[in-house]
Image (tube, rainbow, N blue to C red):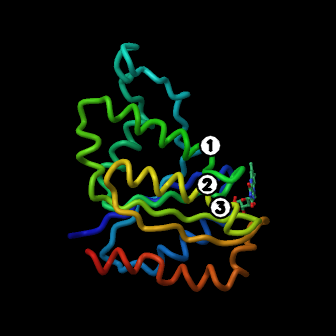
């Protein structure tokens, strides 16, 4: 099966450590693996409205929402590329995940389409791996809820842009991070 990787970059600045680390990992993917890169802050979504429990149906998707939904469905692998912000994912990523709840209530077979995809994370933080646990747990539990495969999180250390390039362990782990995807392809 051809793998189609969707990289969703949630950082609130362009060209930061998280994207650098993700690009290094992506570079190791074979050429026949398709890659789609989207920066969530450049595809803003309206505040999520919880219309469950009798408050009507999920609103008709706008242009950015439709683009994100289509890219999500087209992917075999979704890579959340998010810095650790206050121990968790960036707000743009959290909003995207909240929209999953809306998509569950559209006639698009959301759960069936998500089942069997693989969810991955790439993240950078200035503290230690301990402080990344809420981000890791968020992504892993989202994957579990939707019967997705869990790819794990590639973690790097850094604060100023470029710091992560000096994190030799992370750079080395990036080279083989996606290998598991190819074994099961
Ligand atoms: C809003 C915000 C919250 C942050 N919260 C944390 C945190 O909880 N723990 C941490 O180690 N670093 C935290 N940082 C530092 C970033 O994780 C770090 O600078 C990272 O390199 C940013 O990603 P980027 O380089 O891809 O933009 C925070 C940075 C910002 C802007």
The percent coordinates of residue 51 (x first, y second) are 42, 20
Q: Earlier in the sequence, mark 1 or mark 3?
A: 1
Residue on which the image places disc 3: 132
Report the residue that reaches farthest toward the right. 160
Q: Residue 164's image quarter?
A: bottom right
Image quadrant containing the C terminus: bottom left
Residue 104, above or below 60: below
Query: Which of the marked residues, 1 or 2, is nearer the chain's N terminus?
Result: 1
Which numbered circle lies on residue 6? none
* Residues tagged 1 and 3 counted as in contact (Cβ below 8 A): no
Element type at marker 3?
A: helix
Could you say which is closer to the camera, residue 169 or residue 14?
169
The secondary structure type at the circle numbered 2 is: helix
Image point 71% across, 71% down: which residue?
157
Instruction: Kindly report the distance in space between the C-alpha atoms of the residues bearing marks 1 and 2.
Output: 14 Å
Say if disc 3 is inside 8 Å of ligand 1. yes
Please state the horizontal and vertical placement of residue 146, each as a whole percent of the image.
34, 49
The residue located at (65%, 61%) in the rendering is 132
Please give left or right for residue 103 compared with residue 21 in the image: left
* Quarter of the figure with the N terminus: bottom left
Between 64 and 18, the residue placed more toward the observer is 18
Residue 91 image label: 1
Cβ of mark 2 under 8 Å from ligand 1: the answer is no
- Between the residue at mark 3 and the residue at mark 2, the CA separation in whole angstroms equals 6 Å
Residue plotted at (65% across, 58% down): 83
- Tell me the element at label 1: helix
Whether label 3 touches label 2, CB < 8 Å: yes
Point out residue 126 in the picture as x, y percentages from the top left corner: 76, 65
Is 23 in front, or is 110? 110
């Amino acid at each position: 099966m051809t793998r189609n990787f969707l990289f969703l970059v949630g950082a609130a600045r362009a060209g930061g450590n998280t994207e650098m680390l993700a690009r290094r990992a992506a570079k190791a993917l074979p050429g026949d693996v398709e890659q789609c890169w989207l920066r969530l802050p450049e595809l803003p979504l309206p505040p999520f409205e919880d219309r469950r429990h009798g408050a009507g149906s999920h609103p008709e998707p706008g242009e950015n929402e439709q683009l994100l939904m289509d890219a999500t469905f087209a992917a075999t692998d979704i890579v959340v590329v998010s810095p650790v912000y206050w121990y968790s994912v960036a707000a743009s990523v959290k909003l995207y995940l909240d929209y999953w709840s809306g998509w569950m209530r559209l006639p698009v077979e959301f759960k069936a389409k998500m089942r069997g995809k693989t969810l991955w994370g790439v993240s950078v933080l200035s503290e230690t791996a301990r402080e990344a646990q809420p981000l890791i747990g968020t992504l892993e539990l989202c994957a579990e809820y939707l019967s997705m495969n869990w790819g794990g999180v590639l973690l790097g250390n850094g604060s100023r842009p470029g710091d992560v390039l000096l994190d030799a362990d992370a750079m080395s782990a990036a080279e083989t991070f996606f290998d598991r995807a190819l074994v099961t392809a």
